[in-house]
Amino acid sequence: MKLSGAQILCESLQKEGAEVIFGFPGGSVLPLYDVLPQYPKLRHILVRHEQGAAHAADGYARATGKVGVCVATSGPGATNLVTGIANACLDSVPVVAITGQVARPFIGKDAFQEVDITGITLPITKYNYQVHSAGKIAATIKEAFYLARTGRPGPILIDVPRDVFAEPADFQYPTEHVPPGYRPILQGHPTQIKKAAKLINEAKQPVILAGRGVQISGAYDELKALAETAQIPVITTLLGIGCFPGSHALSYGWAGMHGMAYANLAINDTDLLIAVGMRFDDRVTGNVNAFASKARVIHIDIDPAEIGKNVPVDVPIVGDIGTVLRALNKQVSSARHLEWLRQLDGWRGKYPNEVRDSSSLIPQYVVNQIYQATRGEAIIATGVGQNQMWAAQHYTFDKPNALVTSGGLGTMGFGLPAALGVKVGCPDRTVWCIDGDGSFQMTLHELATLVQDRIAVKIAILNNGYLGMVRQWQELFYKKNYVATPLSCPDFVKIAEAYCIPALRVEYREEVKPAIEQAMAHDGPFLIDFHVEPEENVYPMVAPGASLAEVMVAPERHHKKVSDSAKLPVSNI
Amino acid sequence: MTATKHTLVALVADQPGVLNRIASLFRRRGFNIESVTVGHSEVANYSRLTIVVDGSTTSVEQVRKQLDKVIDVVKVSDISSDNIVAREMALIKVKSGSASRGEIIEIADLFRASIVDVASESLTICVTGEEDKVDALIQLLRGFTIKEIARTGRVAMSRGEIGPLGAAGGATTAAEARRRGRNLKTKGVTNG
Ligand SMILES: Cc1ncc(C[n+]2csc(CCOP(=O)(O)OP(=O)(O)O)c2C)c(N)n1
Ligand SMILES: [Mg+2]
């Protein structure tokens, strides 16, 4: 029996285990939408803007570990996906984006709503396709899902001309479809592993720097075993948060521009940096020439091209994190590193990561209260900016994949749609979106999606009336020249109510806890507009271009920088 | 060949847009590429690229790894340190009336180049050889008026029985290349 291209697509999605499609219809994908009712197991969630569909698929994928799927029509629908695809690409998130395209005879004619979306997304996808016949859809889906989730995951775009959706073809789902040029390396090279073990066994002041690769590989136990056996402090990147329990005795927070001072100082002083599933982003290294300058570096990553890209490496190991660590752990001897850990504890005692005392409503306190109320068990999606950093600093994550945040692209507007996708993927988890007033306004239309599809996301807006992170830079590096950062906001409570979402405004400290409790008690989405201290800054901070050792801590607490060097080169802004 | 010039060869699947992918990669990452040539290989539906990279401004290892990451690239290898055969072809159109024709033909002969077109006011010369030789011929012809030059860029291959792309190259069908390509992929890794 022959099926239409659209039916083949749906059958194939089901074969790949897809359960949810985040999408938005239009002319070129109408044949697909037309057959959707025949596939009730494929839940379609209608977003309000295609960027939201891509972010929702991204959030869904990060939280569940499955491939997220989004759909958009040709032309503007497809281009609206672009930010979301780039976001997924930079954070290695498995997303399959399906776009409609004008019918085959119209391609290249500048037809209505024709854009070259495969051309546009070429540098921001792991791979992309334009499918030229219905007979090729099944194999393409098979390959796309395989590529999206294996090796270093990433987004895949499949562009389907309208008439291909309508074309009949035989359906047979391929058992295997692997492109010839694709073969991720999983096993680490034994010689390299041996070298790494030797360095670890000899190290006096080792540090593990763990990134999102650990979460992707699911190598939590292996990482824990390594850390515990040799008593190695574990520091994560922003995207690595949660890959090692935040309240573990060997957890020393996360590193980088707004990471904990003690984490940055530890990296600065370590004699052996064991970098696991991370890529030495400039936000984590600071001045790369001064980064971990006393250390030998072991770099374990599945992507060979990441090795030596930004930081010279002594022992590179290409492979799957879990597989490599299992082999490595067999050769690592137990150790204690008492003095080194004492040194780290000393730094931590001196520059603790804690909510400062304040009688006014400060954003850090709000995050901490959400942490208390959810007992650390919520999944938190964030906006970008100060809100994101405070969420990452003051919510302690003991479980993996629980902080869903835009790291590589730093996409304002990610929070709400990502939270939506997370909640759809993990309906039994409490999901909070901790957002900025600026970020929230970029995608707040997705409130309607929460309502229409009954998605119980709780929203906390850290409303400081500013594009706060940019204002902070203006304060520190542009003499408080606050150009285009003061933000007039609508009444978010009224906005929420207009969408039939209950909401509260909170202006005082005492109101925080009851408001959060009310939000949690409500069966459905809920919004709290926290009017926080407008000019609160995020500390610690490593100024752009500065080294990790030059980390600045909050002036009201210490009135000085951690290091002697007061010179803060301002570059890369 | 100067030490900073590296020769990479790659076997790529003939998918639509594959050159676009590679060109886009070079541009995006700011790789300084001297030449890229592409043409059919011994395997149906697979093309072979020869890429010359200026190693003084670009990390050749990064180029190799990033190319390897492109899904359509089955295999890529830096053959600079191998014993290789490298050739380039050029077409050179030189202004020439009856007075200079003999002299130009004489120069072309010295380079074993051939005259491929003769018009009343011009001669077109076809030369093949290493880049140095092509450069030298062009240099000599500059004494006349050169109207047009078209150079192919380098194509290269390792000497001896099997080059680094050889194992996949032994295949004559796409399926075979796929199978062999996958086996190949496990090598070519910076693991030790
Ligand atoms: C789409 C996008 N545009 C611009 C920026 C630059 N940017 C980074 S943080 C920030 C301010 C964010 O403001 P808000 O969401 O209110 O968060 P706050 O820092 O105040 O917590 C801006 C504009 C960005 N990251 N993303
Ligand atoms: Mg703000």
Image: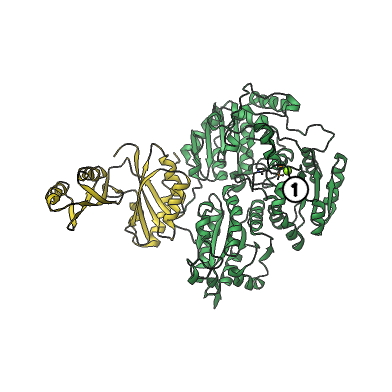
Establish if B160 lies above or below A110: above
Q: Report the amino acid beneath label 1.
A: Ala
Specify whether residue A329 is in view: no
A483 lies left or right of B47: right
Give the mark count: 1
Residue A390 x %, y %: 72, 39
Residue in front for this viewpoint, B119 or A502: B119
Q: Nearer the viewer, residue A155 or A461?
A: A461
Q: Which residue is under mark 1?
A: A378
- Label 1 resides on the chain identified as A
Q: Residue at x 49, y 48 (%)?
A: A185
Figure quarter occupied by ligand 1: top right
- Shown colour of chain B: yellow
Residue that appears at 67% across and 65% down: A44
Q: Quadrant of residue A279?
A: top right
Q: Looking at the image, can residue B174 be seen?
A: yes
Farthest-out residue, bottom: A1
Give the answer, above or below, for where A300 lies relative to A66: above
Point 54% across, 32% down: residue: A288
Chain letter for the green part:
A
- Provide residue A499's location: percent of width, then percent of height: 79, 59
Q: Nearer the viewer, residue A430 or A119?
A: A119
Q: Quadrant of residue A556?
A: top right
Say which residue appears at 44% left-offset and 49% top-offset. Answer: B68
Q: Secondary structure at mark 1?
A: loop
Query: Are there few (<14), some (14-19), or many (20+) residues within 10 Å of tag 1?
Result: some
Using the rendered view, name the quadrant where residue A360 is placed: top right
Q: Which colour style is shown?
A: by chain
Q: Quadrant of the N terminus of chain A?
A: bottom right
In percent of width and height, residue A553 lies at: 70, 29
Quadrant showing the C terminus of chain A: top right
> Where residue A63 appears, x then y in whole percent?
67, 51
